Amino acid sequence: MKKVVILGAGFAGLHIFYKIRHLVGKKIDITVIDSRSHSLLKPSLPEVSFEGAPVSHSLIELKHTLEGRGAAFIQDEVLHVDAKNSLLKLKNGNEVHYDYIFITVGAVKDYDAVKGFREFGYSVCDDIQAQRLWKRVQKFEGGKIVTGAAKST
Ligand SMILES: Cc1cc2nc3c(=O)[nH]c(=O)nc-3n(C[C@H](O)[C@H](O)[C@H](O)COP(=O)(O)OP(=O)(O)OC[C@H]3O[C@@H](n4cnc5c(N)ncnc54)[C@H](O)[C@@H]3O)c2cc1C
């Protein structure tokens, strides 16, 4: 049986997973790899930041969700894609072979690109930052707020 590996279980990776399952059923072996145990639903993070919604409402647990649908899930970071040999090298030292691979690792936020952001800035773009912002919002007593979105490079 051919083996498909989906690297990254965000919106893109999970969408591909459900699409493949729908199109070819269980005729193909699917393994999903993500360094996180839970997929993050980023569009609901403003509710965490501004309404104090529990971050658990923005998370999809991956192991049971995927294994319950006939896929394998590996929680680990992929350090290297060896396309020549169709192999992935994981942080834990293991290697994973694939016949086909989808690389859906998203974008890494470079919070340090804006000087002073770590000290004074807040973001709704990930679960850690969203909860940090909610803590700050609760203490807000008035004053100027500057909002913006960084231009991608
Ligand atoms: C506040 C907010 C609101 C938004 N609202 C909307 C909206 O209304 N509509 C819309 O279309 N989009 C919206 N977006 C954008 C949308 O959420 C993103 O475009 C989407 O999440 C990107 O999905 P992705 O699968 O490409 O990447 P991600 O969701 O970032 O997933 C990538 C996954 O890959 C994993 N990964 C990365 N590197 C490795 C590695 N080396 N090894 C193992 N795993 C790895 C990560 O852990 C992660 O789980 C919003 C975003 C935010 C922040």
Image (tube, grey):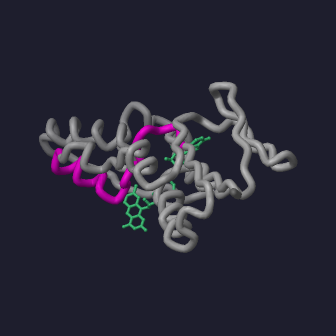
Residue 96: image location, x then y, percent: 70, 40
Task: Note whether 106 is above or below 140 in the view shown.
Answer: below
Q: Who is closer to the viewer here, 151 or 55? A: 55
- The magenta segment is 34-52
Q: Residue furthest right?
A: 84
Task: Note whether 112 is above or below 125 in the view shown.
Answer: above
In the image, residue 58 lies in the stretch drawn in magenta: no
Residue 74: image location, x then y, percent: 54, 39
Q: Who is closer to the viewer here, 108 or 78? A: 78
Q: Who is closer to the viewer here, 26 or 49? A: 26
Q: Residue furthest top?
A: 92
Could you say which quadrant of the image residue 97 lies in? top right
> With 140 as the anchor, is 74 left or right in this view?
right
Q: What residue lies at 31% left-to-right and 43% top-to-bottom?
A: 130
> With 55 as the anchor, is 96 left or right in this view?
right
Q: Who is closer to the viewer here, 43 or 6? A: 6
Residue 19: image location, x then y, percent: 51, 69
Q: What residue lies at 20% left-to-right and 43% top-to-bottom?
A: 54
Residue 53: image location, x then y, percent: 18, 47
Q: What residue lies at 19% left-to-right and 42% top-to-bottom?
A: 137
In the image, residue 39 lies in the stretch drawn in magenta: yes
